[in-house]
Image (cartoon, rainbow, N blue to C red):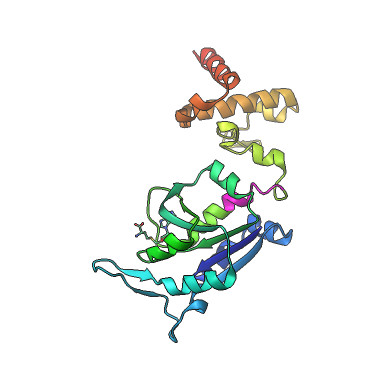
Amino acid sequence: MKITIVTIFPQLINSFTNNRIFQRALENNIIDLNIVNLRDFSNNKHKSVDDYGFGGGVGMVLKPESFFDFFKKSGAKNIIFPSPQGVKLNNEIAKELSSKNELTFICGHYEGIDERVVEKYVDLEVSIGDYVVSGGELPTMVILDSIIRFIPQFIKKESAEIESFEAGKLDFGVYTRPETIDNLKVPSVLTSGNHSMINQYRKRDSLLRTLIKRPDLISKLPKEDKQFIKNIVKDIL
Ligand code: SAH
């Protein structure tokens, strides 16, 4: 997948890509990452890319010219604008975007990007939640990280399938060595070597967590899972 990120802080992106998920995707040529400094497309000698907003009362706004110039020269496709006004990111959106062979992210700053850029070029505005952060770089990396894990060559299918929200429920709890710390023990079934009991335990743990932490997800679960939850609750009572 060809990924282009247009930003006024390229060094910020570099610091985020220095993690296992991005390094593996880059090394295996699953993604081709292209970081574009918006200032390289500035039309003035000071390389400035922002200006005061029309109408007063707002702070600086990223000017449209550099974006227009970049889009005309690059022919970039599937333009995503991380924005608090976009559709809220979830598993389905991440999965859908993972099927594209090219994605372009434009990072806003200050008060945002001149609205005409959004009007003319943006295909999708994506929000990472109902709060405002100061720039589009972090949201871009959050969105991208959630997408990359769905690219089939990147992750073994089984391992993507057991993460939270796949199959509509939360993931089970995980443990590693040591088996005991401060008298807290790993559930004995996990060290029993009995795989069918382990699977049963994990299914129970996953559904119980969903019931406690995200009861809003329960109504969309398949009948079989709902019945399983009823049995768990009956057992507990
Ligand atoms: N004035 C704008 C916010 C500007 S914040 C508004 O209220 O809509 C500066 C930039 O940070 C935005 O252009 C966007 O790219 C990014 N950003 C801020 N909060 C975000 C969020 N919740 N999701 C995605 N991007 C966000």
Confirm whether residue 11 shows in the render.
no
Residue 221 locus on image (x, y percent): 55, 25
Region of the chain picked out in magenta, as a range: 145-152
Q: Is 109 on the left or on the right of 106, as rendered?
A: left
Q: Looking at the image, which is closer to me, 177 or 36?
A: 36
Q: Looking at the image, which is closer to me, 131 or 181?
A: 131
Q: Quadrant of the N terminus?
A: bottom right
Q: Looking at the image, which is closer to me, 73 or 4?
A: 73
Q: Is 32 on the left or on the right of 125, as rendered?
A: right
- Residue at coordinates 53% horizontally, 61% vertically from top-left? 105
- Above/below status of 44 relative to 135: below
- Residue at coordinates 70% horizontally, 57% vertically from top-left? 30
Quadrant of residue 164 in the image? top right
Q: Looking at the image, which is closer to me, 216 or 114?
A: 114
Q: Which image quadrant shows ligand 1?
A: bottom left
Confirm whether residue 134 shows in the render.
yes
Outermost bottom residue: 45
Residue 168 locus on image (x, y percent): 56, 32
Quadrant of residue 72 in the image? bottom right
Residue 180 locus on image (x, y percent): 63, 35
- Residue at coordinates 53% horizontally, 25% vertically from top-left? 208
